[in-house]
Amino acid sequence: MVQLKQQTYGAYIQDCYGVDGEGELTDFMARKGGDLILGGRLNLSELARGYGAPLEVVYTPQITAQVTRMGAWAEQARLRSEYPGRFLYAYATKANFAAEAVQTALRAGAHYETSAAADVIIAHSLFRQGQLPDDRLICCNGSKEPNYIDAIRGLRLDGCEGVVPVLDDLDELEALIDTPLPLRFGVRERAAGNRDGRHPGNDRFGLSIDEIEAVAARLAGTRHELAVYHAMIGSQVEDEAHFLATLRDSVLGYCRLRRLVPSLRYFNFGGGIPTTGYRLGFRFDYAGFLTRLMATIRETCAAYDVPAPDLIGEFGRYTVATHSVYLLEVGATKPGQPGQPDWYLVNGSMMVSLPDSILVEGQEFVILPLSGWDRPVKPVRLAGRRTCDSDDVYPRPGCAPLMLPDSGAGLILAICGVGAYQQMISGRGGAHHCLSPEPGRVIVSEEDGRLVSRYVPQQDQVTIMRLLGYQPQPVPAPLIFDRPAREPMPFRAAAGPARRRISLRQPRLLRQVATGD
Ligand SMILES: *Cc1c(COP(=O)(O)O)cnc(C)c1O
């Protein structure tokens, strides 16, 4: 430690990660002439000089680069493993629904993976505008409420052949089977979700083998077909050998099912491909992973005497984590308690801007100083100066402190890897994770001894789309959030705006007031 105190930040980085203070730091960030450069072209130091901090920088060409690179690695992998099938890159939009992120991924050639009704309606709108071309698949995952089912059906009936409901429950099949146009279905293998015991939350998705066979039997002889076998094992899976070993059983599952179901022709491994945005020095051999996965699939299919499928990956984090960066400025230093690192009080909030820092145990982000690389390095913790919340600190208590230059006030930090999930979970602008609409609200107060209520309707689709930067287009799908949650109550007599009023069981006590937001 004594020696560390003398060491400069630049030398520390060199020692720990083998990267110089000049040139590439990661596969998305470099340092040139003392400035930090994102994606080889965007000068963050200059942006900080121009706009100051706090600032969120959104650099969409990085998304294009991520999609394009993966396409090239997959092509390499296909050649090396002599894989006969195609590789399809899908963007898992729940990682970042912002219009610029989704539209950039689509322009780079990505297919589309949805997680919610509102998501399908956005896809529908993009389909109508020609931004989501006919040749793209739209894989619809997750448990499907009636409005999600309606949105899928609406998209198919509007002529979109690429929409693939991936069944999470047998009821979903029953709800969709009378769709008058042929649908391609997928099944999600439940066993994959928590096969390794590391992802208990994943255990709720998908179907058992028996249920998958029931789907195949139910679809036989209908106008529909079973086309996709979906098996997702986790997210940010950094251990390649583990990733492959865990998927192997799902490949077997595919082959067995393919023997029964000749229409099956896609194997979809879902998400899990890691981003490099969370830890300096983290590397993942993307091309090697795909080569070994394709070789495994090819060999297993040969052993089962079935054709190798087209391979689909649904890339969430990998696509968008690195395209955005927060710049935060240290406003003051506060000494730590004896033996503890100092606090760097920053002009923002980790809780607000990086919610995974408190939600996901051990979640890290690459954090780089814009200046001070020749200053002595020292251990610090960041604290959000704009909140009075003791949880607004990074790294979390119990995790090792950050090593940063000792410059203190005025130091600007680039917090990288924030482009996936963070904005959605923090509800930036008012759109939320998986676009979950804010529920209606009844606000009841007392006036002159009487209870008075005010009702704010549930957030609607048009609002959500505007918040994300889309120009909502009318689609022929049903107005999904207008569906009453329950049977109309006695007082709901009027049509039109009054439908939004609440009905209360004690109308004498509570006066109804309909309001917009
Ligand atoms: C969230 C999700 C993804 C994306 O996962 P990442 O690990 O962020 O790539 C892909 N597929 C499904 C079904 C998902 O739920």
Image (spheres, rainbow, N blue to C red):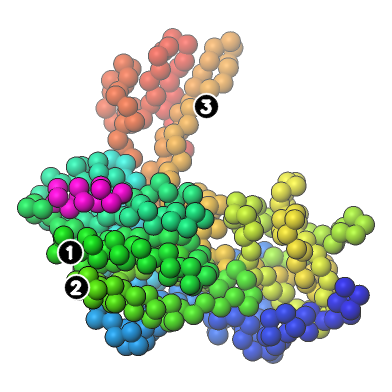
- Magenta-drawn segment: 208-219
Q: Which residue is mark 1?
A: 259
Vertical comparison of 129 with 116: above or below:
below
x and y, in percent, of residue 31 in the image: 66, 85
Near mark 1 (Cα within 10 A), the count class, few <14, some 14-19 or many ≥20, is some
Left or right of 10 on screen, residue 24:
left
- Residue indicated by mark 2: 305
The residue sitting at 31% across, 55% down in the picture is 188
Quarter of the image holding residue 470? bottom left
- The residue beneath circle 3 is 443
Taking the magenta stretch, the answer to whether it contains residue 50 is no
- The disc at residue 351 is none
Q: Residue 224: image x %, image y %?
A: 13, 55
- Judged by depth in the image, the label closer to the viewer, 2 or 3, is 2
| Residue 118 image point, x, y percent | 35, 50
**Residue closer to the observer: 160 or 221:** 221
Residue type highlighted by circle 2: Asp
Q: Is residue 117 visible?
A: no
What amino acid does circle 1 point to?
Answer: Arg
From mark 1 to mark 2, how far is it between C-alphas? Answer: 8 Å
Label 1 and label 3: CA atoms lie apart by 58 Å
Residue at x 32% of width, y 69% of height: 312
Name the residue furthest front: 303
Element class at badge 1? helix
Helix, strand or loop under label 3: strand
Question: Pointers 1 and 2 in contact (CB under 8 A)?
Answer: yes
Find residue 370 and report its horizontal and vertical position in percent: 71, 76
Is residue 209 highlighted in magenta?
yes
- Which one is in front, 393 or 185? 185
Residue 494 visible in image: yes
First along the sequence among labels 1 and 2: 1
